[in-house]
Amino acid sequence: MTKAKSKVFREIYIEGQQFKDVLAKRAAWEEVARMYNGSFKTIKTVSADLMTLMLEIEYKDHQLVFRETDRQALRVEVWVHVPSHNEFFISLRDWTDKLAAILGRRGVRTGLAEFDAKYSINSKEPDFVMELLNNGLLAEKIVATDVYSVILEYDNRTQRHRLVTVKDRTTESVEELKELIDLTCMMVDQLI
């Protein structure tokens, strides 16, 4: 197999579900684990037909957990203690956001045209989100990293917040993973 062909991820369609072979990304994930003194492992289902890549990195007493499966996009999760109980959901704009804009509902705006055109923000505390995004140029970093969504949700049981960032399934290089780590660390710094 040529080098060009070996870089293309295999895709299998079964009953309308899309599967991607994440094994091809293993080398990049292992390299990032070494660079950040983290741990990397692969997990297979009992039937060994689906695989999960899992990377854990320590940052300022917080555990950053990266996970991607053959069926699910790359997710980064980290639990943080935030002084307030604020929550937010930042996601790519879709047709419902465009329709709401036509009907006059503008939503939260950061003032950064590229961010506002690409993402919508849902929060009961828009001032909290605005302070977070405008501090340290976080909105620009989210656009540059090209994530699908960023979610901050409060968990009553643990009395902590869970920060989840979702990125596409085409993230394959060490550089792309480093950008995602930088974004996550920047968000943790802004939140704590």
Image: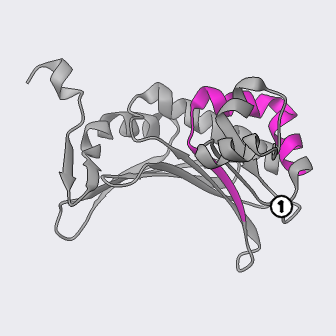
Q: Quadrant of the N terminus?
A: top left
Name the side, left or right, on which 134 lies relative to 97. right
Picture quarter containing residue 108?
top right
Viewer-side residue, 46 vs 104: 104
Picture quarter containing residue 138?
top right
Furthest toward the front, the residue is: 103
Q: In x, y percent, where is residue 88?
A: 75, 55
In the rendered structure, does residue 144 fall within the stretch colored magenta?
yes
The kind of residue on which mark 1 rests is Asn
Residue drawn at 63 percent across, 49 percent down: 96
Picture quarter containing residue 148?
top right
Residue drawn at 37 percent across, 33 percent down: 28
Name the side, left or right, on which 39 lies relative to 36. left
The range drawn in magenta is 128-153
Residue identifier under label 1: 86
Q: Secondary structure at mark 1?
A: loop
